[in-house]
Image (cartoon, grey):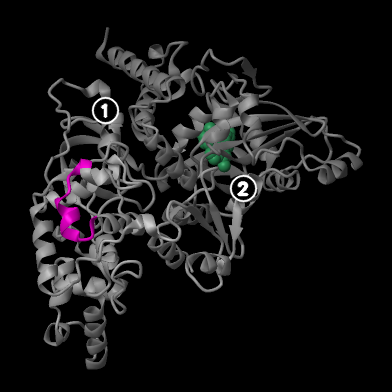
Amino acid sequence: MTSRAARADELRAQIEEANYRYYALDDPQITDAEFDALLRELVELERKHSELQTPDSPTQRVGAVASQRFAPYEHARPMLSLANAVSVDELRAFDERARKLAGTEIEYVCELKIDGLAIALDYRDGSLTRGGTRGDGRVGEDVTASLRTIKTIPLRLRSTSFDKLRMTGSTPKFLEVRGEVYLRKSDFERLNAEREREGLPAFANPRNAASGGVRQLDPALTAKRRLSFFAYQLAVDEGDRSAPKTQWDALARLRTLGLPVNPHVHRAATLDEVIEYCTSSERKRDSFDYEIDGVVVKVNDFAQQERLGVVARDPRWAIAFKFKPREARTKLVDIAITVGRTGTLNPSAVLTPVQIGGVTVKSATLHNVDYIKNNDIRIGDTVLVTRAGDVIPRVVGPVLSERTGRERKFKMPQRCPVCGSDVDHPPDEAMSRCTNAACPAQAYERLRHFASRGAMDIEGIGDVMAQQLTELNLVRDIADTYKLNESALADVPRMGKKSSENLLRNIEASKQRGPARLLYGLGIRFVGTQTAQILVDDFGTIDAIADADDQTLQRSEGIGPEVARSVALFFKQQPNREMIERLRETGVVMSAPKRLRIGGALSGKNFVLTGTLPNLTREAAAELIVAAGGKVTGSVSKKTDYVVAGSEAGSKLTKAEQLGINILDESGLQALLE
Ligand code: IVH
């Protein structure tokens, strides 16, 4: 065997494998660009050396094998694929050849190339009867049931336009629509977030999710993915006199029939206009809520299309201008941890630098430990990296075929890489967190929370001020708030004497808010206003809470193991203890008279708040109820004693009525409290 023949064999094997992974397994391990490169090389090789061509070469068919899970869907006309142009020069060559063959100037229609899954839809007498995937172009999979769940695919064509068509005397008894099923980026993010919560591996990209979604045997699963559809091709009965004669008119007709057509289409009189449209679309690529990977350039006039014909697998009347690929393979050298502003430990990939879509990428997000585990990503792996939209690049997953066995599994550190404190990873959560309230990485968020209305309520410390105070290092942790003075505040830009005085007065006043507000203000995971109030009611002082162990804490009503663990872990951290000491030294009130909750007017009663009350905010109402020994919960159940309803109360009120629960307005609540 010559080395050329060996190379052709190798290419065929690689392409078959890639096709199989892409279409049958939905788990591609090479990028589109890499696939295209392989195919191009093979096409080229077979063109130059025709003796190398085999009847079963992947160059001889349009797409790939249909999986056996579905009934076959035979296409009346083959579903063609498109040749690619990866440069402006290749677009020019396409245009030159087309003009030469047509013998005239050519008008083009440019459409965005939606990155999804091509499908065909059969409409008979205006009703959707069948739908299928492209498959190998001749036979695809019958996925009618899945396609029916896609809301943007009309089950009936719009009858008005349909009847108009009838009036022309040529009833389109049969009509075929082709187009792209895709997933919006926003729906893709939501879907992946859901899958992450369920412990399922995330989808690499919207196209894979769309393709897998259509090819679900259970249509209910398809429906869950919220797929969308754009139509771009129309075929009507032969001999239909009203049939559109150009692509431009076909798109218009699709629209009147009620099919969704992408609005970004452009009719171009010259190739320069085509090029301009292609380059400007590539620039705007991120502004669309769906992935596009190029622009499809089509000869507008159908008669001209006919004349140009089809060669091998590709029509000569259309070409796909492909954007720069935004996926690449590279080496995952290490996994680094950064600490976010809320204390989350965020793993990020340290990559061997690689070009993706014209940008050098050397790091990428890995989201969280579960993501790394679910996708079996290991240090040392060759990984697939995408850079979609303007978001940070993301590691999609390992290329398993490149595994050498020397890869290492990743373990989340037990200590915060910024401050060395314990890391907490609640069993039901995706993120690990640093438990140190004084961790420098968290200063801003902590201060914002500490000063917020439900906590120490320091007017004057909002988003901007909190940012300035932390960036200028005037406040490293919340205790520093009480060390601020006029000379320190003089460093804050645009801070006048008057506002400085006001701020200091508000800070001083906040010392008296009491231990419950303070406890809430510390920003301990799972400790909201109500939990803070319960703990303070039961223990009386911050110190007593800090000294209580897990078990003791759980004796308080409504304090479950999760909350108790989190509270105990917080106070176990030395820096947190020291911070409490510094708060005490500045005179922040840390204890309240221990109150016997049993005696409260609302003792043992469960409340649900809903709607807007005329005077009290919901937080204020909750505080009053809790102070009187009552409990506030989020949802109405048989255990609920009272529902306090304001204006625009919704389903909670309805449910309360159904269950026959006492319903109060604000004055009713006030009466109870007295
Ligand atoms: S026209 C012969 N128009 O790109 C014409 N295709 O290889 C065939 N695609 O399989 C397709 N957007 O899945 C056309 N506006 C568009 C398209 C589009 C996306 C996909 C389609 C096709 C592939 C081309």
Magenta segment range?
A: 539-551
Disc sitting over residue 655 in the figure: 2
Q: Where is residue 131 drawn, in percent x and y?
A: 66, 26
Name the foreground residue: 311 vs 432: 432
Real-space CA distance between mark 2 and mark 1, rounded to the nearest whole angstrom: 45 Å
Image side of residue 273 versus residue 537, left or right:
right
Name, please, the residue furthest toward the top. Answer: 1
User: Is residue 283 covered in magenta?
Assistant: no
Q: Is mark 1 within 8 Å of ligand 1?
A: no
Q: Residue at x 30, y 36 (%)?
A: 371
Disc sitting over residue 269 in the figure: none
The secondary structure that most of the magenta stretch takes on is helix
Q: Nearer the viewer, mark 2 or mark 1?
A: 2
Q: Which residue is mark 1?
A: 376
Q: Where is residue 601 drawn, in percent x and y?
A: 44, 61
Label 1 is placed on what type of residue?
Asp
SS under mark 1? loop
Label 2 Cα crowd, 10 Å radius (few <14 / some 14-19 / many 20+): some
Q: Residue at x 45, y 58 (%)?
A: 602
